[in-house]
Amino acid sequence: MNRREVKAALIVRVAVQVQREMKNPHSAKRIVELLGMKDSPTVRKKVVRAARELEERWG
C-alpha cells in the first residue's frame, strides 16, 4: 500500500466508526465534544452527513 491508499483506508475506517458510534447517545455526545462543537440534534446530523461524505469520497 502506498501512502495515499493508507490515508484513504484510515479516513474510511474512521468515517464508518463515527457513523456507528453516532447511533449511541453517549458516544455521539463524546464525538461532538471532541470536535469542539455544542451538542444538538442538528450538529449530530451534520457529523453523520460529513462522515458519510468522507466514506463515499475515499471509499
Image (tube, grey):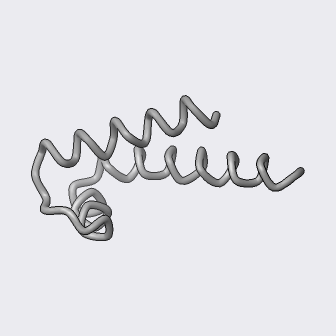
Q: Which residue is drawn at 23% across and 39% down?
A: 45
Q: Which of 9 and 16 is in front in this view?
A: 9
Eyeballing the image, is 33 above or below 10? Answer: below
Q: Which residue is drawn at 13% across and 42% down?
A: 42
Q: Nearer the viewer, residue 37 or 19?
A: 37
Q: Residue at x 13, y 62 (%)?
A: 38
Q: Which of 28 and 12 is in front in this view?
A: 12
The answer to whether residue 10 is left or right of residue 27 is right
Q: Where is residue 17 in the image (x, y as percent from the top left)?
A: 49, 51
The answer to whether residue 33 is left or right of residue 39 is right
The answer to whether residue 1 is left or right of residue 24 is right
Q: Position of residue 6 (x, y in %)?
A: 76, 53
User: Which residue extends farthest right?
Assistant: 1
Q: Position of residue 32 (x, y in %)?
A: 26, 61
The quadrant in which residue 29 appears is bottom left
Eyeballing the image, is 22 above or below 32? Answer: above
Q: Residue at x 70, y 53 (%)?
A: 7
User: Which residue extends farthest front?
Assistant: 4
The quadrant in which residue 49 appears is top left
